[in-house]
Image (cartoon, rainbow, N blue to C red):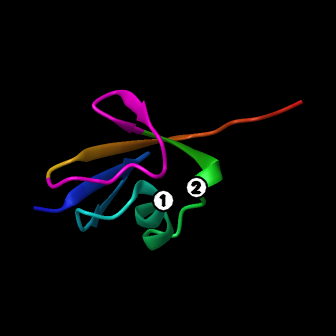
């Protein structure tokens, strides 16, 4: 069972066992441009993704 990553209206599937950072690179997403959540809790980009995980990405917005 793959890991599902959701960002806005897009959904990506990656294999379990990789870090969140590696998964972001695989889907061509810059790690510094998003916050990574699993079950509505923030996780770090070195977290190992497990089978069946539902990951939601939240765009980081900055301004001045």
Left or right? Give the position of 34 relative to 47: right
Q: Is residue 6 magenta?
A: no
Name the foreground residue: 37 vs 50.
Answer: 50
- Residue at which label 1 appears: 21
Where residue 3 appears, as percent x and y from the top left, is 23, 57
Q: Position of residue 43 (x, y in %)?
A: 43, 38
Verify whether residue 48 appears in magenta.
yes
Q: CA distance from mark 1 to mark 2?
A: 6 Å
Within 10 Å of disc 1 (Cα), the crowding (few <14, some 14-19, many 20+) is some
Image coordinates for residue 39, horizontal then vertical, percent = 27, 31
Is there a contact, CB below 8 Å, between mark 1 and mark 2?
yes
Q: Quadrant of residue 13?
A: bottom left
Depth check: 1 or 50 in front?
50
Q: Which residues are magenta?
A: 37-51
**Residue drawn at the location 58% of the way across and 55% of the way down:** 31
Mark 1 vs mark 2: which is more N-terminal? 1
């Amino acid at each position: 069972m793959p890991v599902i990553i959701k960002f806005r209206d897009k959904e990506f599937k990656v294999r379990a066992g990789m870090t969140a950072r590696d998964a972001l690179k695989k889907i061509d997403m810059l790690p510094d441009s998003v916050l990574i959540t699993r079950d509505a809790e923030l996780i770090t980009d070195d977290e190992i993704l497990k089978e069946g995980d539902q990951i939601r990405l939240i765009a980081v917005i900055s301004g001045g």
